[in-house]
Amino acid sequence: MTQRPLLIAGKNGQVARCLRDLAFQQNIPIVAVGRPELDLEDKASIDRVLDAVEPSAVINAAAYTAVDRAETEPAAAFAINCNGAAEIADAARRRRIPFLHLSTDYVFDGEKKSPYVENDITAPLNIYGASKLAGEVAVLKAHPGAVILRTSWIYSPYGNNFVKTMLRLSETQPIVKVVDDQRGAPTSAAELASAVLKIVARLQSAGDRDDDAGIYHLAGEGEASWHEFASAIFASLVRRRRPVALLRPIGTDEYPTPARRPRNSCLDCSRAERVFGVRLASWRSSLEVCLDQLVMDGARAC
């Protein structure tokens, strides 16, 4: 009997691309579908894709992620991150299959002095965070057995992210200014994807039982400010005999953005480890793996 595939909503995002890589390596059948074939703003397209793929589980890695642009496009952010997420969760529930949804540290205001746990009070500072928080509520209402993973500061060799931005700026700017008063946990999309596959396998083996449903935090081990993260990137480039710019720490007030960011984005991930047995590696070690690939890819392109 042919094994039914996993369905990934979204195909070009960092986590989606890492999920595709890992599934290929592990011989896990997987189908990743994004716009226009699967559009979270189009309920008919959701049902059409799920009917065609007949997945064994759904992973929602699709989202509106333009944090600053969301301040002027709130309707678009909520349409995808809340309404669309609820629609695909409901489609999975109707087919009685597991559903895993990715969320964000931006559901918190960053005023807590220690890492956030899952039941801490949420108070997003920006439209993006508010839309993702509304999505969490809507997903669990639509599919009470769903698992929601909040994560933070995603980076990978794919797409647009902080690591790739620092590599570009280190080659094009004499001085790079980076915020030093916002702290969080840099998270490798590859590490997160590996944990997602393990969690989904656990949900599949549980059948109709939804004992593990709910919200979990899952981010890279350790924490850093954006400046400390950049310092680690530059130090690694120096070890690879690559030129780097001068790095200068600045405060948030020196780098105004349309959307406010939380000062503390650190997440306590002990519940995910306790329930699912997953724990992501140190962001510093995962960063080296990512840079190895980026530097190698850059060398091939030369």
Image: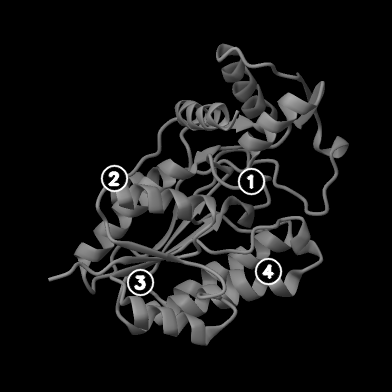
Q: State how far apart marks 3 and 2 are (Cα).
A: 19 Å
Residue 183 appears in view: no
Q: Which mark is residue 77?
A: 4
Q: Residue at x 58, y 32 (%)?
A: 301
Crowd class of label 4 (few under 14; some 14 to 19; many from 20; radius 10 Å): many
**How many C-alpha atoms fall within 10 Å of the one at disc 2: few (<14), some, or many (≥20)?**
few
Vertical placement of residue 266 versus 108, above or below? above
Badge 4 or badge 1: first in the primary sequence: 4
Residue positioned most to the bottom? 44
Secondary structure, mark 3, is loop
The residue positioned 38% from the left and 48% from the top of the image is 21
Task: Give the residue type at disc 2.
Answer: Gly
Q: Which mark is residue 160?
A: 1
Q: How many marks?
A: 4
Please tell me which residue lies in front, 55 or 191: 55
Q: Earlier in the sequence, mark 3 or mark 4?
A: 4
What label sits on residue 145 in the rendered view? 3
- Quadrant containing the N terminus is bottom left
Name the amino acid type tagged 3: Gly
Left or right, 72 with respect to 154, comes to: right
Q: Quadrant of the C terminus?
A: top right
Foreground mark, 1 or 3?
1
Left or right side of 302 for 60: left
Q: Nearer the viewer, residue 201 or 122?
A: 201
The residue located at (65%, 22%) in the rendering is 231
Which label was assigned to residue 277? 2
**What amino acid type should be assigned to the residue bearing mark 4?**
Ala
